[in-house]
Amino acid sequence: MNINATLIGQAIAFAIFVWFCMKFVWPPIMGALEERQKKVAEGLNAADKAKQDLEQASAKVEQELQAAKVQAAALIEQANRRASQLAEESKQQAAAEAERILTQAKADIEQERASARDALRLQVSALALAGAEKILQAEVDASRHSAMLEQLASELN
């Protein structure tokens, strides 16, 4: 056997095998690899986009939280001002009511004092009449001497 003929035969068989692989096996493998490479690239791009979206969403959430905090602080401040205003109004109403009650009480006291004074005048005039009656040993007519009794009552004040 000749090494050259075998070697040439093997080289021809190898060349046919390489041609067959390049024609029928290599293109589907390369297509699958390229498709897989595209999918991986798309996945990486999608991951980058998702990361960017997450950062944007986080920033937006932070902004909304800040806005909510500001709004909550404003509402609390407004509620505190309203509470202070209501407390002040209540104090003013209570002061006005106390003043009204005090004025009413003073008026009632003055009225009671006047009625007590009038009652005392009547009692003093009755006592004066009784004393004068005992002194004079005669009955004094209250209707005839009313002017004198009024003068006596005014002097007692």
Image (tube, helix red, strand yellow):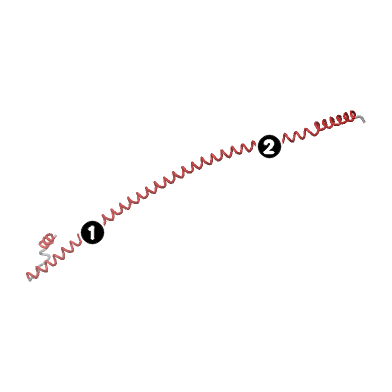
| Amino acid type, callout 1 | Ile
Residue 81, position in %: x, y? 39, 46
**Where is residue 129, by image quadrant?**
bottom left
- The Cα atoms of the two marked residues, 1 and 2, are separated by 100 Å
109 w.r.t. 63: above or below: below
At 20% from the left edge and 60% from the top edge, which residue is drawn?
113
Is 121 in front, or is 97?
A: 97
At 44% from the left edge and 44% from the top edge, which residue is drawn?
73
Circle 2: element type = helix
Q: Quadrant of the N terminus?
A: top right
Query: How crowded is the residue under tag 1: few (<14 C-alpha within 10 Å), some, or many (20+)?
Result: few
Label 1 sits on residue: 109
Decide if residue 7 is on the left or right side of residue 121: right
Query: How crowded is the residue under tag 2: few (<14 C-alpha within 10 Å), some, or many (20+)?
Result: few
70 w.r.t. 147: above or below: above
Q: Which residue is outermost to the left?
A: 136
Residue 147, position in %: x, y? 11, 61
Residue 83, position in %: x, y? 39, 49
**Where is residue 27, by image quadrant?**
top right
| Amino acid type, callout 2 | Val
Decide if residue 34 is on the left or right side of residue 8: left
**Where is residue 5, by image quadrant?**
top right
Q: Which mark is residue 40?
A: 2
